[in-house]
Image (cartoon, rainbow, N blue to C red):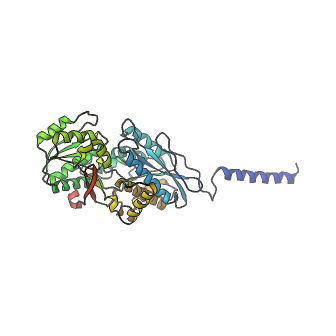
Amino acid sequence: MKKGGLLGFLILLVAVLGLTAAACGGDDDGGGEAASALPSASCGPVRYEGDAEAEWLIASDLPLQGANRSLTTEMADAIEFVLSQRDWKVGDANIGYQSCDDSTAQAGSWDSAKCSSNARAYAENEKLLGLIGTFNSGCAKLVIPVLNRASSGPVAMVSPSNTYPGLTEGGPGTEAGEPDNYYPTGERNYVRVVWNDQFQGAANALYAKELGLTKIFVLNDGETYGIGIANLFVDYAKKQNIQILGNQKWDKKASSYESIASRINASGADAVFLGGIVCNNGGKLVKDLRAGLGNDVTLLGPDGWTPISATIEGAGAAANSMYISQPGIPTDQLTGAGKEFVDDFLAETGKSTVDPYTAYAAQAAEVLLNAIERAGTDERARVAEELFETDIQDGILGDFQIDENGDTTLGTVTFFQVKNGEPTFVKTLTPELSFVEG
């Protein structure tokens, strides 16, 4: 081959290789390489409807099996809805979404082994910019430290529903070493958009006083959340001079709770506070309590008994007259961006109602996406740092900030009562900070 011909051939070869490289990988105009999906054993397929390919991921970690399934799948839909409203982009980055399950069919709720394996997958996937979850505080205790010590830096985590105080601060209702033992790097990577149980426990005690209750027996389900909220209710109830007649665990695997009902009946209690979650055989517990105590003893439960539809389904008519609290305000009382979200989400899904925690899931997604926008995608640890710069004005849940511990400055608790098989709004209550911390 002649010298000129050889030179021409080499130029042509370089051009062809350049085109091949551009076709196989990202170029300056097309962004980075496509994100690798999280394992299908726990996570659904990547949801993405934007241009080109999803370069980065966010995920949610929720129990998608069991009594809470209708609620948690709606929460996942809300997260996807928020991302789709942003056209699957944050700044110039294309963001996909995966909905992951931390439950098992056998447990019917979150599972510790599943939470731990999911956490490892999140930490190892460097295309994952942040996690929305968990739903249950016990699962969060397992996930937070794994994400905190991820090799590429702490992974941002925003919970729409964890209320156990010890995840973010010490004090009433927490255990020794909390919350520092969840942050082995010394850097915080976890925040939540829901009040912690110090406020919910206080609100329940204040409302019990309003109802004229004076002698209360407390039950807990033995889990992190249940023990925590039960102990907090006891502390705040005593401040209201309410007599606590007992604080006993119920066995979620029991076939009958008649003996517990008999003990409560003998104590002379005028109310029972149920610290725990409905998934832990709550329907059977309420049925047996109502059968053994009659209708004159008041039943009160915190947000572990939501969705209230699950409590009603499990307990049937026995749930009537039960009071159930939930952090925040009802979705039909949201204004501004909150009302707009509810209206648009209902129109999109064809549903007639939106659960309060669905709005919290949407707000958690907004907080995470805003942090990603401020931090960029160069270092995912910066996303975690930006969570603590959150200052929301006219958000889905209203105006609020995230404090240095990772807690929201929102403070309202809503009370519902089951009447004729339906949850009925009763009132909202905002405990004074001096009462909560005093």
Q: Position of residue 352 (x, y in %)?
A: 38, 55
Residue 117: x and y, percent? 43, 40
Residue shown at the point (34%, 59%) measured from the top left = 331
Q: Give the quadrant of residue 268.
A: top left
Q: Compare residues 248 and 435 and report the one nearer the observer.
A: 248
Question: Which residue is at the front of the view, 341 or 413?
Answer: 341
Front residue of this view, candidates 335 and 183: 335
Is there any visible trace of residue 66 in the rendered image?
Answer: yes
Question: Relative to 304, does residue 199 appear above or below in the rendering?
Answer: below
Residue 144 visible in image: no
Q: Is residue 276 left or right of residue 271?
A: right
Residue drawn at the location 30% of the way across and 43% of the way down: 278
Q: Position of residue 285 (x, y in %)?
A: 24, 40
200 to the left or right of 11:
left
Note whether 170 is above or below 220 in the view shown: below
Q: Residue furthest front?
A: 420
Position of the C terminus by quadrant: bottom left
Image vertical order of residue 293 relative to residue 336, above or below: above
Q: Nearer the viewer, residue 95 or 324?
A: 324
The percent position of residue 388, horizontal first and vertical second, equals 39, 59
Quadrant in the picture for residue 367 = bottom left
Residue located farthest toward the right when viewing the structure as drawn: 2
Number of numbered markers: 0
